[in-house]
Image: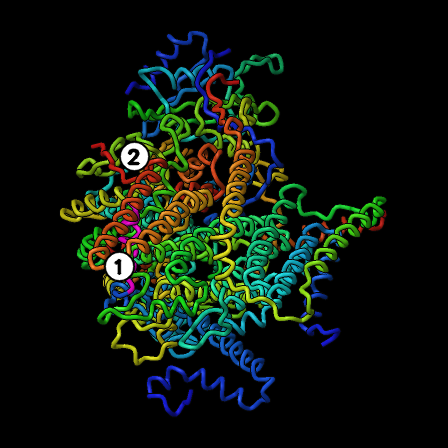
């Protein structure tokens, strides 16, 4: 089994234009991953699958990860002219690292019996540019898993043959696995001591009733 | 015949006949045939559903035992009143008719089914002198009436307006029509040998004994083959495992009676079991000597008891099969009917004819035995092999990776 | 006895005619077919009343067991089970009446000419056995010819209905992505 | 960047015959043969399947979200409920993933117990899978009842060990939860001794049965290359002839210490799936015999492991095992807090369903039910 | 082939049929209300609260630390802390649960609460016949319903309870020794003229080893 670095080198030699980076995994598991630019995703995937030495013919796991916008504060020393004097002032600068959605593929080789090679792609942001190339044409096993990512995370896979919701119902609107997903408050009421839920449900019900009444009035 | 003049076993044997005559005696002469028929009908209508009730318990308990379970045992001692409970339940259950169903046909279907099946019992000899109508063409009557059950099944499936029902009904009808041919053909050998379509005559033809062994048709090569083929075709005719695809719950929910509930469902259930019993009864009549005793020294037991014992045994066999076998697929079922059953029954006809013409002289008897058995066995093995090989079926060996 | 005929006959006849009428007048084709079955059953019973057991049972076996089923299958396979809008009274009713009258006349003529001399004389005792013997001796050639014709028809039907094997070919779509 | 043509797998396309229209049947969600709430939208041409779309999610409870809101330990009982037939192996897979993430060592004794429980789980799962398959075939539940009879013994053993028959919640990060009860190993040995007889019984009842052969041989065929590409794992993959058993490949736990073989089929049809399961049960009995012989003494859980306040260092790990139904994997991302940042289950049941359409197209409806049954899924895991 | 398989299968079911009349192995049904399976010691169903002594409410070991409430995966435990304190089984004043409800319609019997409890106060019951006609209130067990004596615990889980008792006894001995030492020290201090009050604040109980079997 090649190390992640060697695989990266192999990709670089085979596909010189491909933008691939290595992301180290600080955990003891030592499963480092390759981050591939979405536009090169398909080519790299095909290479990984069809290369005779790597032969990563088995995509075991495909999943999404949601990384929220990260706010980092940094203390910056700057010299500023204050009252005609040059002073060194410490300022905290806020950086907002835009969040992104990520699709992660765990690749193994059934022929060579090695793995995993972790293959990731990242969207530009979490809101409107959420398209990634689908790996389903390369590995059929991604078919349902990508549908699931689409359903639960909202990543739109281009080239997926049948991109529909899979676990949630078709009319469902949000993507529940996103980190900032808020539970709806229209639970069916079951009188448990979950008073919070009860309160929210009752409020919701009241709102609904009001809306209904308002609708009736307007009619 | 004078009842008093008979010996005790004979009295027992003719008990029901004399009861019938005794009741008839109360009525003026020109009413007597009608009353006699009515008494007979009442007897059949009372006894076979009772056996049906018994069979349901037996089936559930037997299946339970085969599956290491107890089966129903809560209603009454050993659960024997389970059918009563089931009956009350199905009577009190809401009778649901789908909105889009064709009400009249939906209602008529179970009724027609049960009536047609009951009609079949008319020519079934359940004991010495115990047949409702002894007609020349008794067997033909049975098959004619049996054929009309298909229509009620179609009615049920079609009127329910349900895809599963319709599919189930189509399957059932196709299956019953296909298997009617081998059923008839396998029964014909017995007719050929007896030279009569009369069920009574067929039984009488088998009533002799050699030593202690009876002259049942099943103990001849053609009879045995005919019997096996008849049983298979009967299983298919009555939609029993392994031919129970019309109601194959894993695909079709409940087949043609998916949309039936309450008492109509119970009627279907009843019809199914009555059909099973009547066909088993005819199988017994044709090949197992009807009401004849299996050994000459057991002749003292009344003939009707023998009939019912054999019927019970046949039902147990049906249950046993149900507990063991998975079901076939529609196309395999059809293939089996046309590619295996039909050639085998045709061959069996020829074998039976040969048997008849080879005669039963001392040397001929031995020769025809070997010849007929050999031909049938050869055909069975050959045809079976060919069919299995053609579908590439067979035992397999498996390899291992270390 | 009414007009020298038994009550049973009248009941059966009533059912037979009612079935026939229903078969002609009902809107739903499946209902028509089912009504036709009632007619068939009535006819079979009429045969039995005449002590023609074989004919009666054969009527039941063939017409109820097979023809009726064939009819309903044909209806289902060709038109679906819905109740299409048909007008019962069509413009060609004149022709219909003419044909019906012709058929009736033909039947009546054959019945009248074949009546035995003395009405009510005992019917000849026709048992299944005698029919069988007649079929196997006197009429063996016609029987065989009919059998051959029917077999040919059967085989022909199978060939016509045989699935064109080329249709159900599976196309495995492989390679050449997007 | 454009890519050259590469091999891609899609379900076969059948041209419907021109006679009549297609019949669309929704098999499920309430259908006797769907193992729970599962729907197959089937388009039929006569009785031939032209199109089949599996629809699920009826049992969806967002297990992953629940786990991301709960502590690492609190997810352990939820893993029981994924594939409720195999809670022990589910526990193990999760434990392996966490152990990889945090670098926890598992004591020897716990390893042996894990193997024993996992192999018992495999046997009972395969037995019931065969039972359900035959149920689908209309065998009045007899094989299922025999399977349940044996399964009951195994579940009793599990109850003695963990307190619960099905929801064992037995494994912990770095070992197992409780010490073995007295005489437990002897009881297991007694049960294991009885198992070959049970497998013989099932085989006598089924393997040679002509009807079973007719129903299963050549039906629901899966080609090995498609199986690999579609990520099929477990007995279904090995029935196609691909030699891939994670017990052999990853040698997780202590599977490298046991002698066992991996049965492979050559046809990839339902019969092969059935036989591979039967043969795997036999191999599992072999593993159990070896494992039971030398269970060492010692601690059952890494004594350094805390019950509360488990906070692995940031990072991620993917741990997988050969579950009875296929590769069961857990993918965890830790951000250093007490609950996982990302928790993902790789459900073998769901992914094995990918090829259901491929296997069913062109077949009879009756075979759809069988093919579906031979995949051996549990909806609790498919829907999560 | 050719039917042998079917015959073999028939023989197998016949064997089971016959066997069911003679062998317990082939008739495994236990007819539940009348017959019962032997209780299995490790069985767990729903949690209960252990109390010592005779008064259930006074003897509750629970100190309302709310760890179980927090750790409970389905969140079926509801605890309200008391505002006052009362002596626990070692006589030390402790907060007690003013309300301790478990919604057993939500509880999934996972035993996490037992594992995380540092006070051996919550244990798993083996009682499973808890059906009620009221599916809401009837399935929320309050602390009165949940409290069960240590003797009961000893009865249903003898091995585990013995270990727990031993551990607690050890703790108690330790605490008492400490208290004694503290008292002695206090006495010694009291002998000295100065400060009066040093409450013998017993150290909070250490987290006892969690795996009951370890």
Residue wearing tag 2: D265
- Please state which of residues C90 and B314 is positioned toward the viewer in this rendering: C90
Label 1: chain letter? B
User: Residue B163: image x %, image y %?
Assistant: 59, 48
Q: Residues within 10 Å of mark 2 (few under 14, many from 20)?
A: many
Q: Position of residue B185 (x, y in %)?
A: 43, 53
Residue A130 seen from this side: yes
- Percent of width and height locating residue D43: 56, 37
Element at badge 1?
A: loop
Q: Residue at x 45, y 66 (%)?
A: B198
Whole-percent x, y for residue B353 in the image: 35, 52
Prevailing secondary structure of the magenta residues: helix
Inspect the magenta stretch and tell me whether residue E9 lies in it. Answer: yes
Up the image or down, A183 lies above or below A191; here it is: above
Q: Is residue A88 left or right of residue B109?
A: left
Which region of the structure is painted magenta? E1-17
Tell me the quarter of the picture where residue D115 sits. Answer: top left
Circle 1 or circle 2, nearest the eye: 1
Residue nearest the observer in this picture, E208 or C12: C12
Residue at which label 1 appears: B360
- B307 lies left or right of A130: left
Helix, strand, or loop for circle 2? loop
């Amino acid at each position: 089994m090649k190390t992640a670095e060697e695989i990266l080198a192999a990709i670089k030699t085979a596909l010189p234009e491909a933008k691939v980076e290595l992301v180290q995994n600080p955990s003891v598991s030592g499963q480092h991953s390759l981050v591939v630019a979405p536009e090169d995703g398909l080519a790299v995937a095909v290479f990984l699958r069809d290369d005779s030495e790597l032969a990563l013919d088995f995509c075991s796991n495909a999943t999404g990860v949601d990384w929220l916008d990260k706010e980092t504060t940094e203390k910056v020393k700057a010299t500023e002219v204050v009252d005609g004097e040059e002073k060194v002032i410490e300022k905290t600068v806020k950086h907002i690292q835009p969040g992104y959605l990520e699709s992660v593929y765990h690749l193994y080789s059934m022929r060579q019996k090695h793995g995993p090679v972790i293959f990731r792609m990242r969207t530009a942001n979490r809101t409107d540019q959420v398209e990634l190339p689908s790996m389903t044409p390369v590995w059929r096993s991604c078919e349902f898993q990508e549908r699931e990512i689409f359903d639960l995370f909202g990543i739109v896979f281009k080239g997926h043959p049948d991109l529909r919701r899979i676990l949630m119902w078709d009319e469902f609107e949000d993507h529940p696995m996103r980190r900032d997903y808020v539970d709806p408050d229209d639970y069916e009421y079951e009188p448990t001591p979950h008073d919070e839920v009860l309160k929210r449900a009752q409020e919701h019900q009241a709102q609904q009733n009001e809306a209904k009444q308002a609708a009736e009035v307007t009619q | 015949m004078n009842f008093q003049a008979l010996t005790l076993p004979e009295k027992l044997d003719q008990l029901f006949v004399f009861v019938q005559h005794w009741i008839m005696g109360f009525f003026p002469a020109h009413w007597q045939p009608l009353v006699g028929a009515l008494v007979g009908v009442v007897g059949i209508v009372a006894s076979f559903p009772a056996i049906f009730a018994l069979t349901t318990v037996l089936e559930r308990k037997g299946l339970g035992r085969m599956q290491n379970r107890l089966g129903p045992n809560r209603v009454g001692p050993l659960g024997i009143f389970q059918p009563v409970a089931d009956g009350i339940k199905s009577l009190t259950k809401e009778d649901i008719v789908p909105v889009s169903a064709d009400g009249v046909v939906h209602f008529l279907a179970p009724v027609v089914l049960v009536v047609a099946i009951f009609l079949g019992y008319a020519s079934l000899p359940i004991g010495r002198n115990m047949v409702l109508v002894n007609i020349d063409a008794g067997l033909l009557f049975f098959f004619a009436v049996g054929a009309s059950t298909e229509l009620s099944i179609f009615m049920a499936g079609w009127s329910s307006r349900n895809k599963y029902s319709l599919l189930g009904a189509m399957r059932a009808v196709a299956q019953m029509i296909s298997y009617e041919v081998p059923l008839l053909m396998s029964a014909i050998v017995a007719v050929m040998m007896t030279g009569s379509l009369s069920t009574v005559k067929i039984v009488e033809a088998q009533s002799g004994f050699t030593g202690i062994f009876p002259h049942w048709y099943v103990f001849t090569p053609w009879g045995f083959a005919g019997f096996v083929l008849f049983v298979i075709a009967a299983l298919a005719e009555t939609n029993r495992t392994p031919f129970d695809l019309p109601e194959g719950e894993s695909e079709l929910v409940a087949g043609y009676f998916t949309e039936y509930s309450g008492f109509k469902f119970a009627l279907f259930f009843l019809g199914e079991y009555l059909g099973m019993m009547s066909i088993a009864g005819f199988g017994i009549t044709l090949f197992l000597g009807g009401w004849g005793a299996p050994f000459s020294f057991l002749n003292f037991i009344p003939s009707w008891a023998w009939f019912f014992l054999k019927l019970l045994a046949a039902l147990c066999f049906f249950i046993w099969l149900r507990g063991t076998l998975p079901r076939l697929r529609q196309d395999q079922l059809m293939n089996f009917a046309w590619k295996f059953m039909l050639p085998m029954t045709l061959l069996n006809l020829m074998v039976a004819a040969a048997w008849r013409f080879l005669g039963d002289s001392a040397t001929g008897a031995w020769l025809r035995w070997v010849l007929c058995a050999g031909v049938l066995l050869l055909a069975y093995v050959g045809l079976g092999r060919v069919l299995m090989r053609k579908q590439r079926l067979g035992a397999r060996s498996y390899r291992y990776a270390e | 006895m009414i007009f020298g005929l038994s009550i049973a006959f009248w009941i059966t006849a009533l059912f037979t005619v009612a079935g026939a009428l229903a078969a002609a007048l009902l809107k739903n084709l499946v209902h028509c077919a089912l009504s036709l079955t009632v007619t068939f059953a009535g006819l079979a019973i009429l045969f039995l009343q005449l002590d023609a057991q074989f004919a009666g049972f054969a009527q039941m076996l063939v017409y109820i067991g097979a023809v009726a089923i064939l009819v309903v299958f044909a209806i289902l396979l060709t038109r679906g089970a819905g109740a299409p809008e048909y007008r019962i009274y069509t413009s060609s009713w004149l022709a219909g009446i003419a044909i019906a009258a012709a058929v009736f006349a033909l039947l009546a003529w054959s019945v009248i000419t074949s009546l035995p001399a003395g009405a009510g004389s005992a019917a000849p005792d026709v048992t299944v056995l005698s029919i069988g013997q007649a079929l196997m001796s006197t009429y063996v050639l016609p029987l065989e010819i009919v059998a051959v014709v029917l077999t040919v028809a059967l085989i022909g039907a199978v060939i016509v209905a045989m699935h064109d094997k080329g249709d159900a070919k599976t196309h495995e779509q492989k390679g050449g992505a997007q | 960047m454009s890519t050259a043509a590469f091999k891609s797998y899609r379900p076969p396309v059948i041209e419907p015959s021109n006679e009549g229209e297609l019949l669309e049947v929704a098999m499920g969600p309430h259908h006797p043969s769907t193992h729970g709430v599962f729907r197959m939208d089937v388009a039929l041409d006569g009785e031939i399947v032209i199109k089949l779309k599996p629809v699920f999610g009826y049992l969806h409870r967002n297990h992953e979200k629940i786990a991301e809101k709960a502590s690492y330990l609190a997810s352990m009982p939820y893993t029981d409920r994924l594939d409720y037939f195999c809670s022990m192996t589910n526990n193990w897979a999760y434990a392996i993933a966490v152990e990889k993430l945090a670098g926890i060592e598992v004591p020897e004794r716990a390893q042996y117990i894990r193997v024993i429980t996992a192999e018992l789980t495999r046997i009972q799962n395969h037995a019931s899978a065969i039972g359900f398959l035959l149920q689908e075939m209309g065998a009045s539940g007899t094989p299922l009842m025999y399977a349940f009879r044996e399964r009951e013994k195994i579940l009793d053993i599990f109850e003695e060990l963990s307190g619960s028959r099905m929801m064992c919640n037995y494994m912990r990060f770095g070992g197992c939860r409780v010490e073995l009860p007295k005489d437990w190993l002897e009881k297991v040995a007694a049960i294991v001794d009885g198992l070959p007889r049970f497998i013989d019984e099932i085989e006598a009842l089924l393997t040679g049965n002509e009807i079973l052969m007719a129903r299963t041989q050549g039906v629901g065929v899966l080609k090995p290359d498609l199986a690999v590409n579609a990520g099929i794992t477990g007995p279904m993959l090995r029935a196609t002839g691909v030699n891939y058993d994670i017990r052999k490949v990853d040698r997780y736990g202590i599977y490298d210490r046991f002698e066992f073989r991996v049965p492979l089929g050559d046809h990839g049809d339902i019969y092969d799936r059935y036989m591979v399961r039967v043969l795997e049960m036999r191999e599992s009995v072999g593993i159990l015999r070896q494992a039971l012989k030398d269970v060492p003494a010692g601690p059952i859980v890494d004594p350094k492991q805390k019950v509360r306040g488990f906070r692995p260092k940031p990072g991620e790990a993917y741990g997988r095992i050969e579950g009875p139904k296929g590769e069961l994997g857990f993918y965890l991302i830790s951000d250093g807090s007490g609950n996982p940042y990302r928790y993902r289950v790789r459900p073998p049941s769901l992914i094995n369903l990918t090829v259901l359409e491929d296997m069913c197209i062109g077949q009879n409806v009756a075979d759809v039910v069988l093919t579906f049954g031979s995949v051996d899924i549990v909806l609790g895991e498919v829907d999560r | 082939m050719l039917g042998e398989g079917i015959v073999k299968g028939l023989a197998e079911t016949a064997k089971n049929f016959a066997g069911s009349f003679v062998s317990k192995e082939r008739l495994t049904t236990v007819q539940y209300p009348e017959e019962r399976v032997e209780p299995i010691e490790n069985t767990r169903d729903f949690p209960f609260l252990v109390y010592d002594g005779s008064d259930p409410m006074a003897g509750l070991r629970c100190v309302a630390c709310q760890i179980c409430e927090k750790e409970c995966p389905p969140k079926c435990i509801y605890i309200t802390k008391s505002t006052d304190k009362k002596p626990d089984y070692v006589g030390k004043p402790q907060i007690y649960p003013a309300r301790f409800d478990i919604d057993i319609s939500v509880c999934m019997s996972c035993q996490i609460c037992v594992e995380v409890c540092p006070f051996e106060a919550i244990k798993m019951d083996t009682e499973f016949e808890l059906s009620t006609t009221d599916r809401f209130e009837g399935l929320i067990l309050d602390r009165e319903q949940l409290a069960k004596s240590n003797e009961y615990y000893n009865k249903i889980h003898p091995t585990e309870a013995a270990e727990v008792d031993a551990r607690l006894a050890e703790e108690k001995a330790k605490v008492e020794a400490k208290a004694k030492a503290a008292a002695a020290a206090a006495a010694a201090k009291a002998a000295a003229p100065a400060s009066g009050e040093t409450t013998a604040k017993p150290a909070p109980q250490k987290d006892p080893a969690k795996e009951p079997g370890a």
